[in-house]
Image: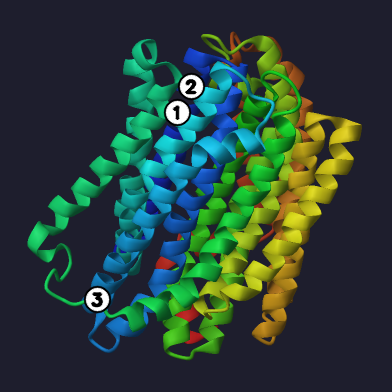
Amino acid sequence: MSKLKFVTLLFFVSTFVLKFSSMLRDVAITNYFGSTRITDAYTVSMVIPNAIVLFMLTGMKEAFLPSYYKYDAKGKGFSHLTNVVKGTTVIATLIALIGMMLSPFIVPLIYNDFQGEAKDVAIWTSVIYFASILLVGVNAVFEGYFDAQRKFSFSVFSQTIVVFCTIGGAIFFHAQLGIYSVPLGYLVGTLISFLIKLVYFKPANFIDWKQKSDWSEIKAFYYIFVPVGLTIAVGQVNLLVNSIFSAQLGDGAATNLNLAFRLINIPQAVFGVTIATIIFPMLARAKSQDDKVLFKRGIEKGLSLMFLFLAPTLAGMLILMPEVVKVVYERGKFTAEATAATSHYAIFYVGSALFYSIQAVIAKGFYTLEKGHYMLRVGIVSIICNVILNAILVNTLGASGLALSFSLVALIYSAITFTTLYKLINGFSLSYVGMEYGKVLIATCAMFGLLMLMKGTVETYSPNEYVYLMVMIIIGAISYFIVLFLTRSRSMKELMNIKQLKREASEGR
C-alpha cells in the first residue's frame, strides 16, 4: 500500500473514531441525564464558549496551514510556529478570563427562561468551557502544524482524547458531580491533549523559547486568521440563535434538537470535512506554486469525492432514521418519546449536512487564497437569514422549524459561496462535477428504491434493530456501488487509486 493511501485511510479511520466517540459522549449524557431541563441548560449554555472553541480550533487550522507553507518556503517555518503559539497564548488567555467573568451576567440574560438549578448549570457550564479555551488555543496551533505536515491522524487523535475524557467524566463522576462531570471532563481532556503534544515534541523542541515574539508577524497572521475564524464560528452563531429559540420550546426540545443535529453531522464530518481536509494541502501547494490548473482540479475532486460518500449515506439515514436514533440513544433515562422527537427533527436537518459539506470544500479554496473575508460576508448574510427563518418557521412548525431553518440557511450559504469562488478563480469544470453528481444521484436513487422495497421484508425477519440496520446497510452499500460501477463513475475509479489521482492532478489532467 502506498504511503498516500495509508495516510488517507488512517485519516478516514481516525475521523470516524472521533465522530463515533462524539456520538458516545452524547449517548453517555442522555443515558445518565436524559432529555430534561437540566440537559437543556447544559446544551444551550455550551454554545457560546463552543463558538470560541471552534473559532480557535478549526479557524486556526484553516489559517495556519497556508501561512506555515509560506514561511516554511523561506526556511522560517519553526520561527513562524513559535510566533503564532506565543501570540495565541496571550490572546486565548484574555478570551478565557473575559468569558469566565462575563458568563454569570451574559448567560442569564440570553437564556432568561432558565431558573433555579437549570440557571446554575447554564452559568457554570459556560464558565468551565471558557476556562478550557487557553489550552484549546495552543492545541489548535499544533494541530494545524500536524495538518501542514500531513499528520492528519495525529491531529484527529488529539481531539479524540478530549472527547474520551468528556465521556469518562460522565461515566465515572455523574453520581458525584451531576451534569458538571461533562464540562469538567472536557477541561481535563484539553489539558491531557496539551501534555501529549508537549511530550511528543519534548519541551526543548516545543517552540523556540528564547525567540522574542515578532508582533508584526503575529498581527499579519491574525489579520488572515480572524476572518477565517469568524467564518468558522458563523455556524455556531446560527446554533446560538437556534438555542435561544429552542430554550423557549419546553423541556427536552433543545436537547433533542441538539442530538438530531449531531447525528446528522456525523456523515458531514466523516466525509465532507475529511475530504475537504485531505485536499487542503493540495490547494495550498497549488497556491504556493501558482498552479491554477492544480488548484481547480483540487476543488473539482473534493466536490466529487465528497458527494460520492455523502449522498448514499444521507439517503439511507432518511429511511432508517427512527431505528438509528433508537439504537444510538434510547437507553437509561432517554425514553421512546425522546427517540421519536429526535428522529423527527433529524429528517429536517439532512439538508444542512449536504449543503454544509459542499461549503466545507469550497471554503478551503477561499482560505487557501487568503480570501476568508468573502466567507465572513456570506456568513453574516446567513445569520440574518437564520434569524428571519427561525422567527417564521418556529411559529408554524415548532421545533421542526428550527431544524428546517438550519437546512435552508445551509442551502443559501453554500450557493453563494460556490458561485463566488467560481467567479473568483475564473471557473472550474462544472461539466465534470455535474456528470459525477448525476452518476451518484442515479446510484443513490436506485439504492433508495431498493431499500424501500426491501424495508418491510427485512424488518419482518430481523430479530432486532441491530440486525435490521446491518442487513439494510449491506444491501444499500452493495446496490449503490454496483450501480455506480455500471455508470462508470470516474470518482469511484480514482478513489480506488489515490496515487494515480494525485499524479493526474499534479499534471493538470
- Do labels 3 and 2 touch, CB within 8 Å? no
Residue 368 higher or lower than 234, as above or below: below
- State which mark lies toward you, 3 or 2: 3
Label 3 residue SS? loop
The image's mark for residue 247 is none
Residue 425, given in percent of the width and then of the height, sits at 64, 85
Between marks 3 and 2, how big is the CA–CA gap?
A: 42 Å
**Is residue 211 left or right of 4 when viewed as pictured?**
left
Local crowd size for mark 2, using a 10 Å CA cut-off: few (<14), some (14–19), many (≥20): many
Badge 2 is on which residue? Answer: 29
Q: How far apart are the alpha carbons under marks 3 and 1?
A: 39 Å
Badge 3 or badge 2: first in the primary sequence: 2
Q: Is residue 64 above or below residue 237?
A: below
> Which of the 4 image quadrants contains residue 213?
bottom left
- Residue at mark 3: 213
Q: Is residue 3 left or right of residue 368?
A: left
The mark that comes first in sequence, 3 or 1, is 1
How far is disc 2 from disc 1 in space, using C-alphas? Answer: 6 Å
Could you tell me the amino acid type at mark 3? Ser
- Specify whether 55 is left or right of 252: left
* Image coords of residue 172 (percent x, y): 32, 17
- Front-most of 276 and 454? 276
Q: Nearer the viewer, residue 472 or 405?
A: 405
Q: Is residue 182 above or below residue 502?
A: above
Kind of residue indicated by mark 2:
Ile
Seen at 51% across and 9% down, the residue is: 332
Task: Label 2, secondary structure: give it.
Answer: helix
